Image (cartoon, rainbow, N blue to C red):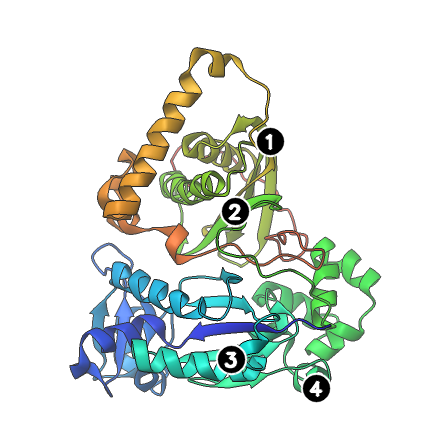
Amino acid sequence: MDRTILHSDLNNFYAAVEKKLFPELEGKPIAVCGDKEARHGIVLAKSEEAKKFGVKTGDVIWEAQRKCPGLIIRPARFSEYVRFSRAVRDLYARYTDLIEPFGIDECWLDVTHSKIFGSGEEIAECIRGEVRREQGLTVSVGVSFNKVFAKLASDLKKPDAVTAVSRENFREKVWPLPVSDLLFVGKATAKKLSAVGIVTIGQLAAAEPDFLARYLGKWGETLSAYARGEDASPVRGMNEGADLKSVGNSVTYREDIYDYADVKRLLYVLSESVASRVRSAGLGRADTVHLWVRDKELANYSFQKKVRSTALCGEIAEAAFSLFKSMYKARRAVRGLGVTVSGFDRGVGQMSIDDLAGEYDKKERAERAVGKIREKYGYATIQRGIMYEDRSALTMDVRGERLVRPGGVDGEVASQDEGEPERLPAEEEGGTDEF
């Protein structure tokens, strides 16, 4: 029996919440932007009215205002966005407990066993109506038999729509689309595929899997299966962790990163999220740290190293930073970073000298205490000293804003890579903190 998977995507989420909070903005072109003084003055989200003027996410503020002279600039209020996101997820929970977040504004829902509420499309229409009535927001919902096609379906018609892609019609609906419309096919991968004549999802589906594996690495096989509708990855409940083999988080930053201090700070932000999730899932300690890097040219790199078993943020972050300094040789500015841990002992690992001395337990108790304070009073309440070097990092709760991507066709967490990166020769070591 086919599964029934929904992918819900809150439309223009940040901008929509601003209009909900400030009704006088209704019908006006607005853009939610980062802090201009902190060098993050770019568009994070825009309203439909602003979109009609060509305003895009990632535009710098002056560029957006030039496109739309009457554009209203709003500051980001992440605590409010998290509040609305949680309220919408509570609404989803009326229909299923299998809800997997994919960022603050997107979720997958497995409603295969929720037939009491109707078909997948009927449930999607109910959700769409309830989100509008109860939260004053709009949502686009895709309905399909797997996660990848459900996500693609939600993107086909926006805003405020339900779109279904079935096993019977996906060849007609999905295969003619550009290959870049497929989940995880970024610009770099699309460019590589185009170079060998693969420009549509159908052409990707028809290509020999062995060729794609040679050309793109192991990720090529996964994309080939996705294009054929063979994604079998489960929708994981938000508190599900028993069968997780890895836990990770990644972020694409608002601007290019040129120096080690900024890299280290972001790796700590990501490691806070990873360590917190590992604790919440009860996975024990991990013995491997993985680092993913995307440079300004959108080339991807991944490295890993064995570490002493740990679930401590500081140890994870320092291992990731060590990998960056020793292994990242491209010397290009960085745009994306990701930290993942694996090799969990499930709480039955061997004791170490640090365990006998009580040092590990002290650090772990401190991190758990910090986590409880943040749960009660907010993420920004208590911070590491390294965060105070950049104001934007103080409120950057990556765990609440950006979540791990779905599993591969075998149900495991998918690779962060887009194919095998080309390794560039290292340049001479410089005498500054830039790389």
Q: CA distance from mark 3 to mark 1?
A: 40 Å
**As drawn, is 376 to the left or to the right of 122?**
left
Eyeballing the image, is 234 above or below 174? above
Q: CA distance from mark 4 to mark 1?
A: 44 Å
Q: As shown in the figure, which amino acid type bears the numbered disc 2? A: Gly
Q: Which residue is mark 1?
A: 345
Q: CA distance from mark 1 to mark 2?
A: 16 Å
Q: Judging from the image, what secondary structure is the residue with disc 4 in?
A: loop
Question: For the residues carrying marks 4 and 1, which lies nearer the camera in this image?
Answer: 1
Q: Which residue is mark 3?
A: 123
Q: Which mark is residue 169?
A: 4
Q: Judging from the image, what secondary structure is the residue with disc 3 in?
A: helix
First of labels 1, 2 by sequence position: 2
**As drawn, is 170 to the left or to the right of 7?**
right
Q: Residue at x 59, y 26 (%)?
A: 348
Whether the residues at callouts 1 and 2 have beta carbons within 8 Å, the answer is: no
Q: As shown in the figure, which amino acid type bears the numbered disc 3? A: Ile
Frontmost residue, 395 versus 378: 378
Q: Which mark is residue 208?
A: none
Question: For the residues carrying marks 2 and 4, which lies nearer the camera in this image?
Answer: 4
